[in-house]
Amino acid sequence: MRQPQATLVGILSAGVTSGLVEALGHLLAPQPFPVEMGRPDAMQQMMADAPLLALAFVPAAWFLGSALGAYVSVRLANLKPARPGWITGGLFLLLALQQLRAFPHPLWMWLAGLAAIAAGTWLGTRQARDTPADGIPPR
């Protein structure tokens, strides 16, 4: 697969993975009351009242999403240089920054989320680059 298509599939897999993990967080730690998404004050109150478990799922989701997205894009592009993985991670980072800026998040979420994306991208890219084409690791 060519690099642009591999990167697109990688960013889609990152988004789907991240969304599924965040949805799991909402199931395990639901918001105690309905929120009016259009009101900034309501969003700020929601972040203040949200269960810590639900908030912690976001950096975890971003780690897993960026790791899988980088892995998928490098493997599909079948390139030794891991450029597609880093591009996928960079695009995912831009999407996360847009999400963080959309409404107020605690500082720890900014730091943990951005670090999680960097670490996930590095791990996914490294794993894909170090795995042989047949998928069987060397002994």
Image: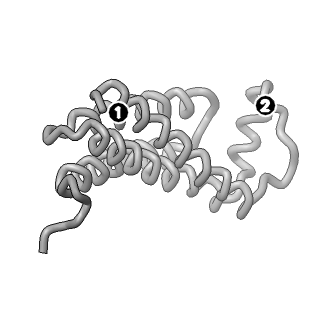
- The residue mark sitting in front, 1 or 2, is 1
Q: Earlier in the sequence, mark 1 or mark 2?
A: 1
Please, what secondary structure does the residue beneath circle 2 have? Answer: loop
Report crowding for label 2: few under 14, some 14 to 19, many 20 or more residues within 10 A (C-alpha): few
Q: Nearer the viewer, residue 65 or 10?
A: 10
Question: In the rendered image, which quarter contains the C terminus?
Answer: bottom left
Figure label count: 2
Q: Which mark is residue 6?
A: 1
Using residue 41 as the reference point, say whether residue 68 is left or right of it: left
Q: Residue at x 47, y 47 (%)?
A: 62
Residue 42 position by quadrant = top right
Report crowding for label 1: few under 14, some 14 to 19, many 20 or more residues within 10 A (C-alpha): many
Q: Residue at x 54, y 47 (%)?
A: 18
Residue identifier under label 2:
37
Q: Nearer the viewer, residue 72 or 30?
A: 72
Amino acid of disc 1: Ala
What x and y, as percent, mark residue 135? 25, 60
Please, what secondary structure does the residue beneath circle 1 have? Answer: helix
What x and y, as percent, mark residue 19? 60, 45
What x and y, as percent, mark residue 115? 36, 47
Using residue 127 as the reference point, say whether residue 101 is left or right of it: right
Q: Residue furthest front?
A: 134
CA distance separating discs 1 and 2? 34 Å
Q: Residue at x 33, y 39 (%)?
A: 73
Amino acid of disc 2: Met
